[in-house]
Image (cartoon, rainbow, N blue to C red):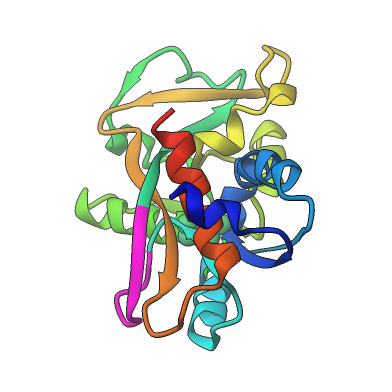
Amino acid sequence: ELAAIHGLVRGKLKIAAVTTAEYFVPDLLGPFARAYPGIEIELSVENRDRIVQRLSQGLDDLTVMMLPPAELDLDSQAFQTNNLIVIAPANHPLSNKKLRLNELSGERWLMREAGSGTRKVTEQFFAKQQFQPNIMMSLGSNEAIKHAVAAGLGIAVLSDLAVNQPAWSSTTNGLRILDVADFPIVRQWYLVWRRDTPQSATARGFIAYLQQQASG
Ligand code: PGA
């Protein structure tokens, strides 16, 4: 609440975010950092497996991720949806058709690296649909996947946050979103923290700040 935020003058706020959250977490931090210039913010960005490791070691005040691990005693707060879509090169022959997933079995798929939450959700979804993708390559970042897709190496599932960047939103960006049944895969972004560790004043302040933003 407001009182908690008013007490905030100086301190450190350590936030960890999975790589896909790098597209929006700085936007959340910006106004907070301007309002509380005495608070030093440290943002770590890594894939889900490494972020889970950081959580289990208690390295951060707050974590932003899509799949909070069940094995840790955590509190979480959902705050935004994450839509996973299928992207193809702009000139892909299927780019203006309504598709079913099994029509994409002959495509070459590009996947995020093992350890990525995006990959985990994609694999779970494919397994549920009994779809066996022809996996051509794994790449270690969303940006590498976008460039590889644009270069015609294959198609991929990515968060729309990674795709709808201004530089990529024009028609010359080399990418198309395919219209595939049951897509987007809709998941949530969560703000996560450990239940067994007392929350820092800065973490409480940031949570209160986000709640204020959400309630307008
Ligand atoms: P990642 O992010 O694919 O960058 O790991 C998604 C998530 O785990 O939330």
Q: Residue at left 49%, top 75%?
A: 52
Task: Give x and y (percent) for residue 100.
Answer: 27, 30
Q: Is residue 126 visible in the rendered structure shown here?
A: yes
Residue 16 location, x and y as percent?
60, 65
Position of residue 189 in the picture relative to residue 166 (left or right): left
Asked if residue 153 can be seen in this view, the reply is: no
Left or right of residue 146: residue 167: right
Q: What stretch is highlighted in magenta?
A: 68-77
Q: What residue do we see at 52% from left, 32% from top?
A: 87
Residue 44 against residue 157 in the figure, above or below:
below
Question: Does the magenta run of residues contain 186?
Answer: no
Report the quarter where the C terminus lies: top left
Residue 72: in magenta span: yes
* Residue 120 occupies quadrant: bottom left
Is residue 140 placed above or below 110 in the rendered structure? below
Task: Tell which of 141 and 101 is nearer to you.
Answer: 141
- Residue 171 lies, with reference to residue 1, above or below; the image says above
Instruction: Provide the major secondary structure of the magenta segment.
Output: loop
Q: Where is residue 187 in the image (x, y as percent from the top left)?
A: 34, 46
Q: In this view, does 25 lie above or below 60?
A: above
Quadrant in which residue 138 is drawn? bottom right
Apparent side of residue 186 relative to residue 25 in the rendered image (left or right): left
Query: How many marks are shown on the rendered structure?
Result: 0
Q: Position of residue 53 (x, y in %)?
A: 53, 81
Q: In which quarter of the image is residue 146?
A: top right
